[in-house]
Image (cartoon, rainbow, N blue to C red):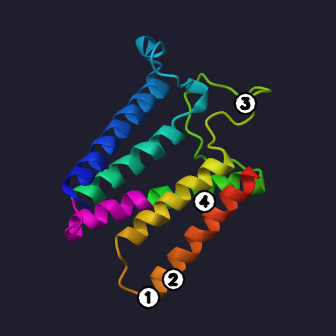
Amino acid sequence: MSNSTTRTVENVSLLLAIASLAAVLHATFRIGWMESWLPWEVEYGITSPALILIAALCCWALARWPQPTPAQAMAIQAGAMVLVVVPVLVVLEYLLEVNLGVDLIRSDVFASVTRPYPGRVSPNAALAVLAVGLAYLLLLRPTSHRARWLLTLALSLATITSVAALL
């Protein structure tokens, strides 16, 4: 990427990270002055903005370090794995109708008719985040041809399923 493109990706990633960090803080501590400018209801939970924060930081790191050191690659890989594991657990919660504990909410937020699972990421959003995590793992350029093939297949399935759910 060119320097201006790289800087743009870095800046947009940082802006997204700041916005999602603000949503995490607001959802966690219900900060009154944030309510006027941050359209995030505490009933939405902490999981979604936390996943967006991790995705933004991974994007920033990949733009910042196109050839990451082993330590940097491991940090990006850890973030990408969170972006893969949490959405898989969310989809399992919907499919199996169980609570696996990934719906992070404040203790004073309760289920209602309009929000039966407060804090739970929607299945479509979970698949989209899963696709982002798989894409980041692919961007780390796995050395094994089989790993690249499996990641590409999983990414394609997650994307197709997510788009098909919108139709």
| Structural crowding at the residue carrying mark 3, measured as other residues with C-alpha within 10 Å and reported as few (<14), some (14–19) or many (≥20) | few
* Mark 3 vs 1, N-terminal side: 3
Question: CA separation, marks 1 and 2?
Answer: 6 Å
Tags 2 and 3 touching, CB below 8 Å:
no
Task: Tell me how far mark 2 sits from mark 3, CA to CA.
Answer: 39 Å
Q: Nearer the viewer, residue 146 or 103?
A: 146
Regarding mark 4 in the picture, which secondary structure is present there?
helix
Tell me the element at label 1: helix
On the rendered image, what quadrant is the N terminus found in? bottom left
Q: Which residue is mark 4?
A: 88
For residue 115, the mark is: 3
Label 1 close to label 2 by CB (< 8 Å): yes
Q: Position of residue 127 (x, y in %)?
A: 61, 56
Q: Position of residue 116 (x, y in %)?
A: 75, 33
Q: Disc 4 or 3, which lies upstream in sequence?
A: 4
Q: Residues within 10 Å of mark 1 (few under 14, many from 20)?
A: few
**Type of amino acid at the residue the image marks with label 3:** Arg
Q: Nearer the viewer, mark 4 or mark 2?
A: 2
Q: Position of residue 145 (x, y in %)?
A: 43, 88
